């Protein structure tokens, strides 16, 4: 009997019988061609999800009417016949692994002509929305005339016919997150006086017209999925009551209702639509559960769902019929197959850290903190052959980079010895077990430890790697991953008892007072501030720059700033000048001094690479590499990637 019998039971949608209840939710593209067609890299990205065992793989961001609806460059023009070839290649690649190919049909509404969160280049297009408005930036949105509405409705039908022709066996209509269809539905945005505005039924008219046009284009039995908001979570917007009304209106027109929440263009809601680790796993599932009670059509849920145990409970309890995963399948595309086989310890846990989305926003590329293969799926189809000979690999440092290097090198057949000078593995990840909102990171540390134990790598704890130790082992390869040490600023009083290093606040012999000042407003200092404030401390962050958390990933910083605004006093453009028994004396950019009283002062001004250890170990082995924080202080993302890539090159 399977460990998760409900999760891996079949379900019928239209004329399809799906093999399980896990869908790969639509995600944004990366590395599209200059014409915005899918590339080999994109296709390999989606194919890997299919190979991992999901029932359905949905390609994201298909735009039905690019002239008015394309909000950013990384969207697929479904009104361009020349896109057919790449769409067809992607559908074939997905089917190759027994999954069903689906695709998202969308329109940006007013964001097709306005700078938006995901795109600034709007090519001087006119912005058309439900109603005329002037944005806070002084930009004009024009009320969409009915002839254009009808043209866009027809474009949905044409796009549906195109994707069916390309080999897709179902499709998803995006009616949520602040795009066109949800703009018309929302009373906050739609102020029209005609048949498309006013009453709920009028505001829902466009959605119904679109669904009818698509059904006519694809015919009976072809599954149509509607993504809708269970709640907009914004004053004046649609509520759960509205979501239930919409679900009842559409249930005889669709085969699956996908319940999401929030609005992409409201920063604090973006991180609710795509929950960070400040929110509980599955925080939006209750919306799907409420809507499922009101309709007979199957319902799917989304929102930070990463654990097969929770997925099974959702299906078994009747909260939803299907779970849709996005970031969890970046972290581990093989999550479904591993869960089905009962190998849950091997599943790489998603951190919900927003590194993936932030990378798309900043560089139009895709990476994952815990999965270094993400963004390299095409190359990984042609993996390096096994090494010509097995090498003896000695790794100094049991942090994330060292552990990943050990796991990867052992998997490639090398003889691996991992040495850690302390009594436990984890390095910079160890603190996570003490912080509730870092539980996903703690799970990742435990996953790495499990994978090392499951490999043939030898682990030596309480073992420092010196030149003499390297000489006694005679390795072919030495990988140094010894990390960094805290920077201690040279200010008077830094050595008094009330000063605690950020790396030491969880030590058993350290007591944190009720009134805390954190010197340093980088990512570490801000996260510790939120943790301590939620623990009941009165916390102030002092940062010398004009903004805090500038080293945080773009979208995660949004969530972090929300948490800081709730719990922590933040003081910027201010430097610590001296520490006294009363607190810390600071000076601001106007040279004004102020004493911030504190029982405990936490020093979080940064890290310094342990380059001296690297230099001591150079030339002690035929092949020498150093990775992670000992190169320069960096994030877990870079350490994992460096460990993986270094080991793959051996």
Image (tube, rainbow, N blue to C red):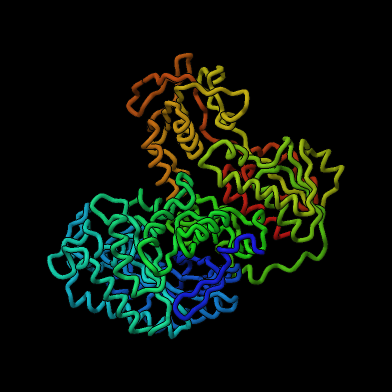
Nearest the eye: 477 or 327 = 327
- Identify the residue at image location x=26%, y=55%: 237
Quadrant of the rendered image containing residue 607: top right
- Residue 270 in view: yes
Quarter of the image that includes the C terminus: bottom right
Instruction: Tell whether 488 sits left or right of 83.
Output: right
Quarter of the image that includes the N terminus: bottom right
Quadrant of the rendered image containing residue 338: bottom right
Instruction: Tell whether 322 sits left or right of 206.
Output: right
Quadrant of the rendered image containing residue 4: bottom right
Outermost residue, left side:
193
Nearest the eye: 314 or 107 = 314
| Residue 107 percent across, percent down from the top left | 32, 69
- Identify the residue at image location x=37%, y=20%: 594
Nearest the eye: 216 or 290 = 290
- Identify the residue at image location x=45%, y=58%: 319
In the figure, 584 relative to 29: above or below? above
| Residue 263 percent across, percent down from the top left | 33, 56
Nearest the eye: 230 or 125 = 230
- Identify the residue at image location x=38%, y=66%: 227
- Residue 44 in view: no
| Residue 468 percent across, percent down from the top left | 83, 38
The total of numbered circles placed on residues is 0
| Residue 88 percent across, percent down from the top left | 49, 82
């Amino acid at each position: 009997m399977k460990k998760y019998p409900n999760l891996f039971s079949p379900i019928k949608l239209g004329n399809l019988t799906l093999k399980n209840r896990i869908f790969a939710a639509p995600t944004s593209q990366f590395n599209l061609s200059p014409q915005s067609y899918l590339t080999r890299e994109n296709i390999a990205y989606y194919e890997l999800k299919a190979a991992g065992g999901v029932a359905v793989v949905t390609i994201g961001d298909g735009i039905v009417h690019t002239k008015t609806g394309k909000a950013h460059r990384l969207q697929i023009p479904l009104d361009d016949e020349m896109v057919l070839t790449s769409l067809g290649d992607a559908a074939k690649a997905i089917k190759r692994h027994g999954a069903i190919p689906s695709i998202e049909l969308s329109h940006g509404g007013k964001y097709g002509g306005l700078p938006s969160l995901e795109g600034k280049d709007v090519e001087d297009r006119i912005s058309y929305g439900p109603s005329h408005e002037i944005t806070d930036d002084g930009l004009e949105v024009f009320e969409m005339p009915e002839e254009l509405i009808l043209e866009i409705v027809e474009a949905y039908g044409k796009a549906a016919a195109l994707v069916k022709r390309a080999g897709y066996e179902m499709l998803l209509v995006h009616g949520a997150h602040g795009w066109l269809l949800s703009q018309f539905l929302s009373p906050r945005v739609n102020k029209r006086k005609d048949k498309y505005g006013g009453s709920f039924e009028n505001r829902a008219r466009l959605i119904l017209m679109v669904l009818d046009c698509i059904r006519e284009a694809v015919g009976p039995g072809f599954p149509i999925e509607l993504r809708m908001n269970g709640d907009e979570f914004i004053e004046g917007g649609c509520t759960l009551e509205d979501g239930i009304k919409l679900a009842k209106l559409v249930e005889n027109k669709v085969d699956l209702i996908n319940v999401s929440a929030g609005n992409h263009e409201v920063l604090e809601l973006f991180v609710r639509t795509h929950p960070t680790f400040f929110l509980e796993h599955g925080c939006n599932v209750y919306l799907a559960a409420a809507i499922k009670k009101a309709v007979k059509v199957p319902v799917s849920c989304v929102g930070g769902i990463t654990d097969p145990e929770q997925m099974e409970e959702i299906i078994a309890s009747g909260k939803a019929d299907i779970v849709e995963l996005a970031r969890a399948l970046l972290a581990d595309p093989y999550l479904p197959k591993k869960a089905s086989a009962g190998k849950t310890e091997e599943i790489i846990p998603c951190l919900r850290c927003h590194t993936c989305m932030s990378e798309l926003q900043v560089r139009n590329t895709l990476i994952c903190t815990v999965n270094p293969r993400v963004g390299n799926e095409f190359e990984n189809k042609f993996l390096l052959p096994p090494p010509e000979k097995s090498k003896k690999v000695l790794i100094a440092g049991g942090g994330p980079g060292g552990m990943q290097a050990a796991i990867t090198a052992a998997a490639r057949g090398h003889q691996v010895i991992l040495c850690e000078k302390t009594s436990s593995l984890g390095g910079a990840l160890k603190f996570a077990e003490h912080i509730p909102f870092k539980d996903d990171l703690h799970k990742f540390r435990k996953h790495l430890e499990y994978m090392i134990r499951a490999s043939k790598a030898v682990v030596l704890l309480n073992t420092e790697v010196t030149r003499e130790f390297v000489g006694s082992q005679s390795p072919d390869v030495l990988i140094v991953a010894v990390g960094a040490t805290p920077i201690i600023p040279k200010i008077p009083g830094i050595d008094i008892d009330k000063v605690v290093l950020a790396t030491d606040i969880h030590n058993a012999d350290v007591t944190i007072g009720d009134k805390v000042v954190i010197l340093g407003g980088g990512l570490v200092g801000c996260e510790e501030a939120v943790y301590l404030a939620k623990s009941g401390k009165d916390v102030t962050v002092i940062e010398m720059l004009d903004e805090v958390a500038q080293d945080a990933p773009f979208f995660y910083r949004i969530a972090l700033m929300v948490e800081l605004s709730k719990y922590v006093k933040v003081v910027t453009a201010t430097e610590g000048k001296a520490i006294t028994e009363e607190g810390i004396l600071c000076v601001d950019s106007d040279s004004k001094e102020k004493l911030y009283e504190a029982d405990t002062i936490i020093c979080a001004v940064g890290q310094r690479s342990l380059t001296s250890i690297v230099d001591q170990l150079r030339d002690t082995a035929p092949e020498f590499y150093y990775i992670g924080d000992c190169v320069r202080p960096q994030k877990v993302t870079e350490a994992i990637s460096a460990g993986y890539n270094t080991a793959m090159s051996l």
